[in-house]
């Protein structure tokens, strides 16, 4: 049956989700919106905006998912004792 | 510890499998050296891979509900990631994405960003909570979360309809891709190709459901990876002496920018562009003088044909003239439409090439802003659509735990990136080859692949190179390439042996089949689990449920194959539309279902209907092929990105209607608390 979970777990989850969503949104929007301004800069010989759109953003997304997975595991562990796990 | 030994057993199996696949490649390479004809190599590849998928299907046959629907919930994260990546990489991605980048330059990168960034939303907002909920389908979750006091069926029905519509559009495109590849590489008829592909899909999903599909998709991912990477590595080593294409193409990119600048001052290029401009103007004059010009043109065509016949013209000329007369517009209205099209075609060809690395290249700052806004809108739709596609989300039910689901999203994105980071490299390297080796070459020495690919479909040639200004030398403006051949023709362009072409075809087939598998299962599960079991006959035995599902799978597959065999035009742009539809109909209810407790049944129903309706309305209103017109666009947003209006409409409907109606059922709140808990 359902056991009321400690709200602090949800609070941490929500905070982490919000921070990572902001990073996701800021990066995506920033790179696209300012792509023309970044076109003249170079990154190891690449036009910066092309690099960011073709590879940089995608790698950043992978990082965001990685951070989320890693941090959520920590949050889950911290709160594991508080709850009778029904996580099968 | 049982999980661990299962994991290592899988690693062992798939290592053997990969080794076997490499051995097959080597054998084919040797056979080609020994003089095995090309068609045989094509047949062997198709046959070997299709038999392989069927074999995995037979080995994992099952009729247990949990095995059939969610692969027994014991797929390790890494392998679920691979399977999801194969599920994700569709025929459109494999065949068309690089072509889009080649043709549209920077603007094509919207797909790369949208189709990877969407996984952040899948990870942060949806998939782990779905796994915690732990049932079988997406409508399952929505029905439980938005249950009413008396019944949970209204939301379930709407969710089922949305799921089926979205998946069906998508699966038709996949089967279409299967037919295309099978017919091109083995020479069988298009419809025969479709049914051959369908047979292997069915053996797999029919026998083993999600379990068979999962293990097949892992196998298919490995083939896709080989097929995509080997030609690009080869091409990169040829051109840049660095086999890591993802790094080496940066230097090629700057060289391309220099070449592009030269095109704009080259007198020969200018000459060709002027000719195109003149042709467009000629059409413009004819358009102005309708309907007299239509009458006149028909008479001229008739007279020309008669004159040829009188003067004993050559048979080829007579045939061409009578074909021209046959294809002449039947009415002035038709003439107006066709000539308008022709005029725009020529105007487009008179334009300088789109610079590869310049973002939102346009003639004026306003046009450039519109391009940027459309880029943003498209990225938005693709991301939210990714996070709401039922066949992808369903895969995250199959892992052993919530943590494993999160891990598997990471692996999914990782395996997708292995391909996606290579796509721009492929486009850029092929472009470099075309700019340096094909442009400026002699018409008498055109490479072999040009005539091969031009002859596959004579009515709509995939590549056409015509000497417009009769100087005997290829100019860039004289080349027309269909984006779809970029990937399929790369091995020939790079002069690789034919078995690599076979490998690429097998990869494209794997991409189409794996996605089609997942989609068909999604549709038949929505019908059998949500409609039959949950609504019609809740007492049905487990054996009966699986049998019903298998029968429905057969029906849906045949229906999809039939639709695809009609060759509905513009099917690939419909795939883009499916993302907008998924985002508009399902994203608001999925995301707020977890993060907003006040959402209730009435709100969810309103959200699905309003989101979907807004999206469909905008597409009908603005898409020319569906009877709309571009003048009806809001903020100059293209119809494909209709989700940019559909999603806010859906969110608004959910919030407003929920707040106006009583709070949700306590059982729904219990569910929300439960899925939020660790």
Image (tube, coloured by chain):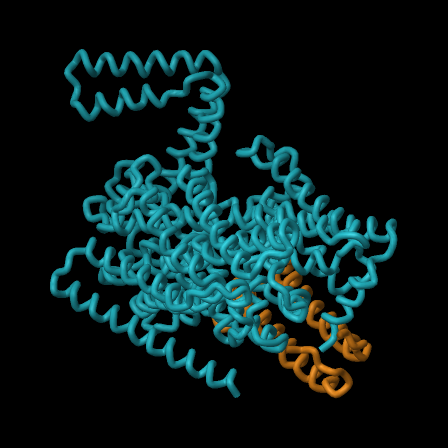
Rendering coords of residue B664 (x, y %): 83, 58
The picture places residue B318, in percent across and down from the top left corner, at 22, 21
Q: Colour of chain A?
A: orange
Q: Quadrant of residue B293?
A: top left
Q: Nearer the viewer, residue B504 or B17?
A: B17
Residue B539: percent from left, percent from top: 63, 56
- Answer with left or right where residue B186 lies relative to residue A59: left
In-image side of B544 versus B127 (left or right): left
The residue shown at (42%, 78%) is B10
In the foreground, B43 or B25 = B43
Q: Is residue B2 above or below residue B435?
A: below
- Note the chain letter of the cyan one: B
Q: How many marks?
A: 0
- Above or below: residue A57 compared with residue B434: below
Q: Where's residue A7, x and y in %? A: 82, 77
Residue shown at 74% from the left, 83% from the top: A84
Q: Is residue A44 above or below residue B264?
A: below
**Residue A46 in view of the camera:** no
> The C terminus of chain B appears in which quarter of the rendering?
bottom right
Give the residue displayed 39% in from the left and 64% down from the top: B57
């Amino acid at each position: 049956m359902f056991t009321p979970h400690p709200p602090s777990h949800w609070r941490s989850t929500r905070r982490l989700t919000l921070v990572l969503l902001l990073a996701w949104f800021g990066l995506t929007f920033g790179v696209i919106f300012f792509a023309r301004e970044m076109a003249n800069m170079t990154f190891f010989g690449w036009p910066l905006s092309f690099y960011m759109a073709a590879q940089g953003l995608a790698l950043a997304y992978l990082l965001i998912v990685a951070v989320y997975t890693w941090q959520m595991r920590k949050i889950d562990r911290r709160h594991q004792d508080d709850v009778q796990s029904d996580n099968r | 510890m049982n999980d661990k030994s299962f994991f290592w057993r899988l690693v062992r199996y798939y290592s053997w499998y990969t080794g076997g696949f490499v051995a097959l490649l080597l054998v084919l390479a040797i056979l080609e050296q020994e003089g095995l004809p090309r068609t045989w190599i094509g047949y062997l590849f198709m046959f070997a891979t299709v038999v392989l998928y069927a074999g995995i299907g037979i080995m994992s046959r099952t009729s247990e509900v949990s095995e059939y629907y969610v692969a027994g919930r014991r797929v390790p994260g890494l392998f679920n990631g691979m399977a999801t990546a194969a599920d994700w990489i569709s025929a459109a991605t494999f065949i068309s994405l690089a072509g889009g980048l080649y043709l549209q330059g920077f603007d094509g990168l919207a797909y790369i960003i949208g189709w990877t960034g969407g996984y952040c939303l899948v990870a942060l907002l949806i998939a782990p909570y779905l796994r915690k909920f732990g049932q079988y389908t997406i409508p399952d979750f929505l029905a439980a979360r938005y249950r009413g006091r008396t019944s949970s069926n209204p939301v379930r029905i709407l969710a089922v309809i949305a799921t089926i519509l979205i998946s069906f559009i998508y699966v038709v495109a996949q089967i279409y891709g299967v037919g295309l590849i099978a017919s091109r590489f083995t020479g069988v008829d298009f419809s025969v190709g479709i049914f051959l592909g369908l047979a292997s899909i069915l053996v797999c999903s029919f026998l083993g459901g999600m379990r068979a599909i999962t293990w097949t998709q892992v196998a298919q991912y490995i083939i896709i990876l080989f097929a995509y990477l080997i030609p690009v590595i080869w091409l990169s080593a040829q051109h840049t002496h660095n086999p890591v294409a993802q790094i080496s193409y940066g230097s090629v990119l700057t060289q391309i920018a220099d070449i592009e600048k030269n095109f704009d001052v080259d007198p020969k290029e200018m000459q060709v562009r002027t000719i195109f401009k003149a042709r467009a103007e000629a059409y413009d004059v004819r358009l102005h003088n309708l309907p007299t010009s239509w009458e006149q043109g028909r008479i001229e065509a008739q007279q020309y044909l008669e004159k040829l016949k009188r003067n004993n013209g050559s048979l080829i000329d007579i045939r061409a003239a009578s074909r021209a007369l046959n294809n002449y517009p039947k009415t002035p209205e038709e003439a107006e439409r066709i000539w308008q099209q022709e005029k725009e075609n020529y105007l487009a060809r008179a334009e300088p090439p789109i610079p590869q690395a310049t973002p939102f290249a346009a003639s004026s700052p306003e046009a450039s802003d519109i391009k940027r806004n459309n880029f943003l809108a498209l990225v938005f739709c693709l991301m939210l659509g990714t996070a709401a596609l039922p066949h992808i989300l369903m895969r995250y039910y199959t892992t052993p735990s919530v943590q494993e689901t999160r891990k598997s999203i990471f692996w999914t994105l990782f395996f997708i990136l292995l391909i996606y980071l290579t796509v721009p490299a492929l486009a850029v390297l092929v472009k470099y080859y075309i700019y340096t080796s094909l442009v400026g070459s002699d018409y008498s020495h055109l490479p072999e692949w040009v005539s091969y690919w031009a002859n596959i479909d004579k009515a709509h040639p995939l590549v056409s190179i015509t000497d417009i200004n009769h100087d005997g030398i290829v100019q860039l403006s004289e080349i027309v390439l269909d984006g779809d051949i970029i990937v399929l023709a790369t091995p020939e362009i790079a002069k690789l042996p034919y078995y690599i072409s076979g490998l690429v075809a097998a990869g494209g087939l794997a991409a189409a089949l794996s996605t089609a598998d997942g989609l068909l299962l999604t549709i038949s599960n929505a019908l059998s689990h949500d409609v039959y079991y949950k609504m019609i006959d809740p007492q049905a035995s487990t054996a009966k449920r699986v049998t019903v599902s298998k029968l429905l799978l057969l029906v849906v597959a045949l229906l999809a194959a039939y639709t695809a065999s009609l060759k509905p035009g513009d099917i690939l742009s419909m795939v883009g539309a499916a993302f907008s539809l998924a985002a508009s109909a399902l994203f608001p209810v999925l995301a707020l279902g977890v993060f907003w407790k006040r959402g209730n049944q009435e709100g969810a129903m309103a959200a699905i209907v309003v989101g979907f309706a807004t999206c469909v309305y905008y597409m009908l209103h603005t898409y020319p092929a569906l009877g709309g017109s571009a003048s009806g666009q809001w903020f100059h947003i293209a119809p494909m990105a209709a989700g940019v209006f559909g999603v806010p409409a859906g969110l608004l409907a959910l919030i407003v209607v929920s707040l106006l109606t009583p709070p949700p059922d306590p059982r729904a709140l219990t569910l929300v608390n439960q899925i939020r808990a660790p």
